[in-house]
Image (cartoon, rainbow, N blue to C red):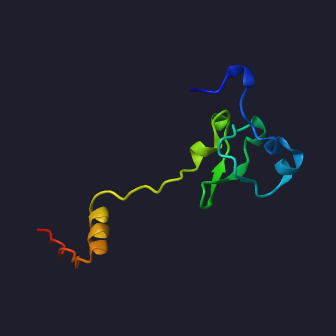
Amino acid sequence: MTRSTWKGKFIYKFLLNEKFLKRKKKNIWTRNSTIPASLIGKAVFIHNGLQFYKCHITREKVGFKFGQFAYTRALAPKGDAWKAKKDKKAGKNVKKAPAKKGK
């Protein structure tokens, strides 16, 4: 269910504060806040629960939520890297195959 249109977009009041806009390092903990137009062209640091991710605000990002640009989950490795990591955790001796020589 989406937010009611009569309520308007949720923007944390501190994001519109002049003191916040003048800061060099803008840390944001409210991932559910909508990105205001006053931050266009500025870099902000969005908290994902563990660390801060740097995000440059462009005109295309205005109106979206801050949380969409700072992922909270790590991406799983794919292919051979994943298999080697899995074998290493299991305690298996993993040896790389020798490189094939070309003709």
Left or right: residue 10 versus residue 14 is left
Q: How many marks?
A: 0
Percent coordinates x, y for residue 57 in the rendering: 68, 44
> Please, is residue 38 above or below residue 5 in the view?
below
Q: Residue furthest left?
A: 103
Q: Residue furthest front?
A: 1
Q: Residue at x 15, y 71 (%)?
A: 100
Q: Quadrant of residue 53?
A: bottom right
Residue nearer the viewer, 36 or 42: 36
Q: Residue at x 69, y 47 (%)?
A: 30
Q: Quadrant of residue 52?
A: bottom right
Percent coordinates x, y for residue 22 in the rendering: 85, 51
Percent coordinates x, y for residue 81 in the rendering: 31, 64
> Please, is residue 4 above or below residue 59 in the view?
above
Q: Residue furthest top?
A: 6
Left or right: residue 76 versus residue 48 is left
Percent coordinates x, y for residue 89 in the rendering: 31, 73
Residue nearer the viewer, 13 or 1: 1
Q: Considering the image in quadrants, where does the N terminus appear? A: top right
Q: Residue at x 65, y 41 (%)?
A: 32
